[in-house]
Amino acid sequence: MMTVSLADRLLAGDSRALARAISFVENEASEGAEIIRRIFTRTGQAYLIGVTGAPGAGKSTLVDRLTAAIRAAGPTVGVVAVDPTSPFSGGAILGDRVRMQAHASDAGVFIRSMATRGHLGGLARATSEVALLLDASGKQTVIIETVGVGQDEVDIVRTADVSIVTLVPGAGDEVQALKAGIMEIADIFVVNKADREGVDRTVASIESLQALQTFGAGDWRPPIVKTVATTGEGVADLLAAVDRFRAHTKDSLGSRRKARAEFRLREILSRRFLQRVEDDVLRPGEFEAYLERIARRELDPYSAASEIMTRALAHQAAGGRGHGREGP
Amino acid sequence: MMTVSLADRLLAGDSRALARAISFVENEASEGAEIIRRIFTRTGQAYLIGVTGAPGAGKSTLVDRLTAAIRAAGPTVGVVAVDPTSPFSGGAILGDRVRMQAHASDAGVFIRSMATRGHLGGLARATSEVALLLDASGKQTVIIETVGVGQDEVDIVRTADVSIVTLVPGAGDEVQALKAGIMEIADIFVVNKADREGVDRTVASIESLQALQTFGAGDWRPPIVKTVATTGEGVADLLAAVDRFRAHTKDSLGSRRKARAEFRLREILSRRFLQRVEDDVLRPGEFEAYLERIARRELDPYSAASEIMTRALAHQAAGGRGHGREGP
């Protein structure tokens, strides 16, 4: 079978097989689910680094520098960059080419941007599956880069093995705006563009928010690392902070990975159920008809959901075609 | 029944009933679903304005000014502000109090921030339901304000009747970062803080991206409105642009409202199915056990989903308790 050999080639570290598998996952093709199924037990080797921050914080340059620093230390690196702001046109591809050039001669680096979107957490699901593919292909470190102020992106980043929140000087408003949220997400803070005015004020803002938190004796207190990604300044410090965090959380990695598992399983179950409803339970055009009645305010969405649930259950009890094992 | 009278009071415009109903929706309480069910056919009267932009773009001040301008023209206003960056601590409440003060003497204004979070589109669902409650309570204009670079937030804003994207001068990086996405979301661009240096360059960046788009003869070409929200400058122009867009799209409003209906219905169906799986199909602790096996890489999430789906269907065929009509 095509997908068997593709999975095998991917597990052997073939970059073209990796790129192809990513496309399947990105397009929500059934081959994508099949590949994930085949490679899953071989994953869990890579360390997942989540990097988030507002647009313009210099995340992609920072991730490029971090990638170079990790490579210099030895481990191979896979990067998946979520680009949720161009979900419609797949405009991320050109960006990939530009970014790959910096590592063009290095087979130990693979970078991919995600511009896919889908219903109900589809982007988060696809991102997390691309991370699995990179892991399975032998990348020892996987970096997930997102614009991290949306719910999906927060979910992506907080389920990484370590979460880095990137800010820039003069982002006092932003620190305020982000307040509680980032304090609970961040394992490490980066103040990038640290050659700009206002860097100390931004550091002080973070520290004043940290002062409101209580840290126990053995608790990790998120360090604040200043970087200038364009020159590479501070990137070694950032990598050192990642290594310290990794050592600190060696024994508690499992709970984050369980949260990631929950996120995945719920998304897959939801998608399958909705697919089943549309394909098997309802007649063609009937889902559309429900939407029109809701849009016209003739029927409320909860009553529509109840009707559909009742029909889905009756359908099954009457021996409807069992579609339990098809993916995705 | 309590919820009957609460729905009635809400429909009569009672602010306390409105606040209470919002809390039910926000906490995903079953009363919330019941209230939505009762008021739904009475909604669809309000015009929904989506306002999005990165943190620090001055959205909340802009929305306050816009609210005042709309009120001066007559219509009542409800505001729901999504605060996805503080999903953990419910820190939005204090902000509401500060914001309400500007309209404290005006019973025609109601402002509420959302800090709720949930699985798979829960925030988007809650926001859209709060908008319904505001609509049902008689608010003629409902403004949904989000930090709009995440997938959920994009979904919220693009299903509003009109989408306003807010940028600030000097956000050249940001315009680039946002590129294709915002071009397809925005019905109106606002360059806020237009008294700052770089405003013309930001306007030019947007125009150069618009130059790449093709507009037909009758197509809406998103205008670029400069504002200084802190002084109110340009806010009248913004309101005029909203009114022009509203007149322009009078006949095509239905398709957006259908997209909103789809978003809602899928989210409710997913949630009910997952609830059913956890409550009825699996034994207590079994969902957890699946997660642990996935986290330990003993089982892949697709195979787990297949097993659970098969069991859910067998359970029903064997006459499992039918939970089709419970909410939410």
Image (spheres, coloured by chain):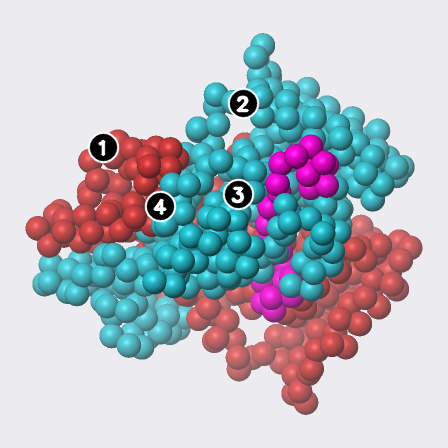
Chain colours: A cyan, B red
Residue bearing the label numbered 2: A249
Q: Of the residues tagged 1 and 2, which is closer to the observer?
A: 2
Residue A70 magenta-highlighted: yes
- Badge 2 and badge 3 both on one subunit: yes
Residue bearing the label numbered 4: B301
Which region of the structure is painted magenta? A66-92
Cα–Cα gap, marks 1 and 2? 29 Å
- Badge 4 and badge 2 both on one subunit: no
Kindly tell me whether residue A285 is visible in this rendering.
yes
Question: Is A21 placed left or right of A276 in the picture?
Answer: right
**Element at label 3:** loop
Compare marks 2 and 3 and give the one earlier in the sequence: 3
From the viewer's side, name the closer residue of B10 and B190: B190
Tell me what residue is drawn at x 61 percent, y 75 percent: B246
Tell me what residue is drawn at x 53 percent, y 65 percent: B159
Residue bearing the label numbered 3: A138
- Badge 1 and badge 4 both on one subunit: yes
Cα–Cα gap, marks 4 and 3? 20 Å
Percent coordinates x, y for residue B289 in the rendering: 29, 33
Mark 4 crowdedness (10 Å alpha carbons): few <14, some 14-19, many ≥20: many
